[in-house]
Amino acid sequence: MSARLLLATLSLALSAGAVHAAPVTATGELVSNGGFEATTVKSGNWITYTNAGGGYSGWTLGSNGVEIRNDAVGAAYQGSNFAELDTSANSWISQSLATTKDTLYTLTFAYSPRSNVGSDSNGIGVYWNGTLLQDITASGLVGDGAGNDWTLYTFNVLATGSSSVLKFAATGKSDTMGGGIDAVSVKAAATTAVPEPASLALLGLGAAALAFSRRRKRG
């Protein structure tokens, strides 16, 4: 199916405050196993990983674990696998990242509602250091219902210390069916300008600018 692009910008108002230049010293990818490709899952199937079973590479898991799917009710955004957080019930995953204080980072990930499932079941909350960036949901009842319909999200986030925690949590109905995520990445942002302390708290709430593109894949 041909790709469709959707661009939007969401702005976060900043309180008045001087801006100074700070060197961005962190480089490269900070997220481990952001594409959920650490294990092989047979096409058309899924595996549920739990803490009791040893967890899942790179990620800390909630009590209900995480489902890693390969072309099961939809194809991955990239590679073979993607993650669903409503396993036997709603769950979450998180990862502690090595960051540099007062440095801006670019967080990107792909989200898709589960096909043939309503928006009330597809919610996923995205958190940076415990602060909700956005509670994302969409309906899988629209369109042709033939697999995942991915949206790529991008946030600029601020590190306030030497480590930062990224978390995704299922927020829809706890009914074993929920949205998927894939291609999770955190890298140092291109910009090096960060605000003085009066504005840091507001930056920590989420993206200074959010842009996203959308493309549909048939699963």
Image: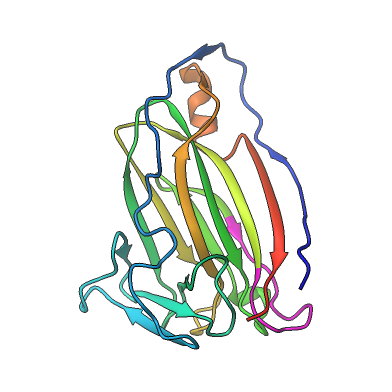
Q: Is residue 150 left or right of residue 106?
A: right
Q: Quadrant of the N terminus?
A: bottom right
Q: Is residue 15 above or below residue 206?
A: above
Residue at image coords 33%, 67%: 38
Residue 109 on image: x %, y % = 54, 55
Count of marks, rendered view:
0
Query: Which span of residues is magenta-colored?
Result: 135-149
Q: Compare residues 93 and 107 and report the one nearer the observer.
A: 107
Main SS, magenta residues: loop
Residue 164 vertical placement versus 19 (above, below): below
Q: Position of 57 compared to 5: left or right?
A: left
| Residue nearest the viewer, comparing 133 with 96 | 96
x then y, percent, for residue 199: 53, 23
Q: Name the spot of residue 96 as percent of width and height, x first.
A: 31, 48
Q: Position of residue 122 (x, y in %)?
A: 59, 73
Magenta-colored stretch includes residue 207: no
Q: Is residue 104 above or below residue 32?
A: above
Q: Could you say which quadrant of the image residue 68 lies in?
A: bottom left
Direction from residue 84 to residue 52 in the image, left or right: left
Q: What is the quadrant of residue 89 in the picture?
A: bottom left
Name the residue at 71% across, 59% down.
214
**Is 82 in front, or is 91?**
82
